[in-house]
Amino acid sequence: MFVVLEGIDGTGKTTIIKMLAESLSKKGHKVFITQEPTRTWLGSDVRRAIEEEKNGYTQALLFFADRAEHVKELSGHSQDIILCDRYVYSTFAYQGAQLEKHMGLQNALKWLESVYEPMRLDPDLVFLIKVDPEEGMRRIYGREKKEKFEKVEFLRRVQEIYDYLADIYGFVVIDGNRTLMMIHEEIFQRIKSKINK
């Protein structure tokens, strides 16, 4: 089973994935935790492109290069429960927000989808954890270095695109304004239900 957690910065995705992995392992499931950008040299190049504020096309293509290799790795874990911290929908939301001013959102999403198509590996479940951008910023305030993406106005637009994607792709939308334990429990129960079907 391939499970993805999405959301703007400050939603607690990374912590919740660790909690889910522990809960699922206790139930006897083999769990593989991963993320995008990956921790490979390709993922490092993606982070560098963001840090150096390269244009949206460059960033998107680097994300897809990283993802092409990532998909190959994920295919080797088909017997596991894969928990992925961000996936292609982050590219649609973040780079979509960047490219919107150059080509309009619909054209940007169409282009991003076309690049994704040859490497396509769709998840079984996608959870969109929603928090208000101001709350997300408050939560990450203590981070030593904030990425360019971590700006309230930009995050608000990213959240709007995530909402749009949720309707198209059928994400399970999760209220991220609750405690991490409550969020974990809701997602855990939904994963269990999917496993039992």
Image (cartoon, grey):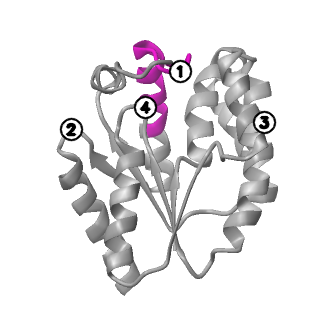
Label 3 and label 4: CA atoms lie apart by 20 Å
Amino acid carrying label 2: it is Asn
Residue 138 screen position, x and y as percent: 29, 21
Q: Which mark is residue 62?
A: 3
Which region shows up in magenta? Answer: 146-162
Residue identified by numbered label 4: 9
Label 3 and label 2: CA atoms lie apart by 32 Å
Magenta portion: prevailing SS class: helix
Q: How crowded is the residue under tag 4: few (<14 C-alpha within 10 Å), some, or many (20+)? A: many
SS at mark 2?
loop
Residue drawn at (23%, 48%) of the image: 180
Residue identified by numbered label 1: 149
Q: Earlier in the sequence, mark 2 or mark 4?
A: 4
Residue identified by numbered label 2: 177
Q: Which mark is residue 176?
A: none
SS at mark 3?
helix
Q: How crowded is the residue under tag 1: few (<14 C-alpha within 10 Å), some, or many (20+)? A: some
Residue 98 screen position, x and y as percent: 63, 21
SS at mark 4?
loop
Label 3 and label 1: CA atoms lie apart by 16 Å
- Residue 197 shows in this picture: no
Q: Earlier in the sequence, mark 3 or mark 1?
A: 3
* Badge 1 vs badge 4, beta-carbon distance below 8 Å: yes
